[in-house]
Amino acid sequence: MSAAGFLSQLLQLAIALLLAPLLLGWVNQCRAWLSNRSAPSLLLPYRMIRKLFHKDAVVAENASPVFRITPYIVFGAMTLAAAIVPSLATDLPFAHAADAIALVGLFALARVFIALAAMDIGTAFGSLGARREMFVGFLAEPALLMVLFTASLISGATSLPTIVETLAHRDIAIYPSLAFAGVAFTMISLAENARIPIDNPATHLELTMIHEAMILEYSARHLALIEWASALKLFNYSCIGLALFLPFGIAQPGADWLAILGAIPALVVKLAAGGFALALIETLSAKLRIFRAPEFLGTAFLLAVLGMLVAQLLGG
Amino acid sequence: MTSIALSQLINPLAAVLLLLAFAMLAQRRVLTLVHLFAAQGFALACSTAIVASATNQTHLYWSAALTLILKVGVLPRLLHRMIQRLDVRWDVEGLINIPITMLMGIVLVVFSFNLAFPIAQLASTVTRATLGIAMASVMLSFLMMITRRKAIPQVIGFLSMENGLFFAATSATYGMPMVVELGIALDVLVGMLILGVLFFQIREQFDSLDLKHLEKLKEGE
């Protein structure tokens, strides 16, 4: 393990933890602008997390230890994922711990625990949210795997840094397989991050909630960790998308300090554009009925599989 | 050099054709189906023109122009008029629900890619890789004709199958002779007109365009 690799790993982790709430604030601000409302402050997610950390936690009487440890597990899983996804540099010591498939497993671990915690309290809304989450999850996960398989088929590896290095070194051209995979990935990220066609993150109506219904019982530091973890999840998904489909500007191995520092503005610009695109998609589309979700995610799966087949047939 | 750059464009266009075939398979509305059919015709005309300029085959320019006029201009307009005259803008009901149809479509695509692979190995055209996609779009149009109950989507399936066959001909052998192509174009046009007349007859007889009523025509019941 090189010292530079270790330092770029630390820098990337710190940037992920710090920028994740900012990305969420940016998306909310863009959404407000696009729907002609006055925008909330960009720093609102930070303030909310700080406020929640200062409060006293209230835990239901019949809560089991699962309910208490879930926020830490979810936050830990998302932080580990942020360490694995190459967003600034590809020379990451942590990335050898898990390849693309294990990364999907890491997201699944967080999902299972949050669903267990939601059912643990025994409220109606909690188990309703948990069931819906698993329903969406079991449709989205195979599609996500197919997208990652498309990328690994092209680069011949399942480790994310190798995939990114291979993809970044190809000549600029239109690759149909990657275009299919990109559209599929966008649809999957919308579903996984509880965004509008599947779930509305800003809703106050419990009957239509998915993600929000699961965390209704959480308060104070637990809620702060979960909110931070979902901001991190959005950040991670954006970084996976950028790494797979726009891998330009990510520092290659053997790069000096300047290249790694230069990757930061590139990342910020790409994330800002991605966040605006997300807000645009959310503003333009309406929430689907929950039973339309299989169709939406089925299309994503179809596109991902088509991408893989086309990669096989046309050679990338 | 330009021909190499152009032939780079054939693969994305083939992928677009495949995508449009799937979109037609999943589409519920008749009018959108017609628009998708026109888009497929446009993609087909573009890819034919690109193959023509990449290989310097002048007769392919003619067939590209013919495709453009017939499949982007005339046929969609005829279909539009028919839909308006028959007043059938309702949502199309499939026999099987859409996610399952899509999964069947994926199986068909895998099947035809495998089928086309040995043929493509033998071919020496620049477009040989796209033969699998052409066969897949033929198969998908077949599937669309099988899973739809109403007459108009079935006809659109038939027309898009012809698109797939045309694409297969371009990608396997740089297109058919001009006489054959003109003949097919005329056939499609006349077939369309006859089917149009048939639609009115079917509706007059059964007050519906649902083809399951045709089963009543069996003897001995």
Image (spheres, coloured by chain):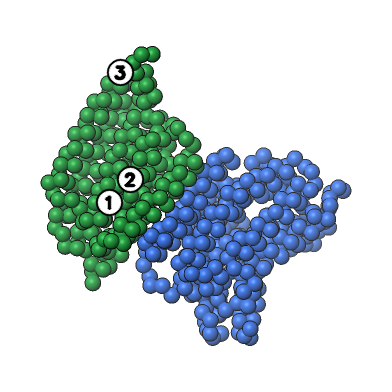
First in residue order: circle 3 vs circle 1 = 1
How many discs mark residues in the rendered view?
Answer: 3
Q: Colour of chain A?
A: blue
Disc 2 chain ID: B
Question: Dividing the image into 4 quarters, which one contains the C terminus of chain A?
Answer: bottom left
Q: Using the rendered image of the protein, determine whether residue B46 is visible from the camera's viewpoint.
A: yes
Front-lying residue, A232 or B216: B216
Residue hosting label 1: B168
Extreme residue in the left direction = B179
First in residue order: circle 2 vs circle 3 = 2
Disc 1 chain ID: B
Secondary-structure class at tag 2: helix
Residue type, numbered disc 2? Val
- In percent of the image, x 20 and y 45: which residue is there? B69
Disc 3 chain ID: B
Extreme residue in the right direction = A61
In the image, the chain rendered in green is B
Image marks 2 and 3: residues in contact by CB distance under 8 Å = no
Residue B204 is marked as 3
Of badges 2 and 3, nearer the viewer stands: 2
Residue type, numbered disc 1? Ala
| Position above or below: B158 against A279 | above
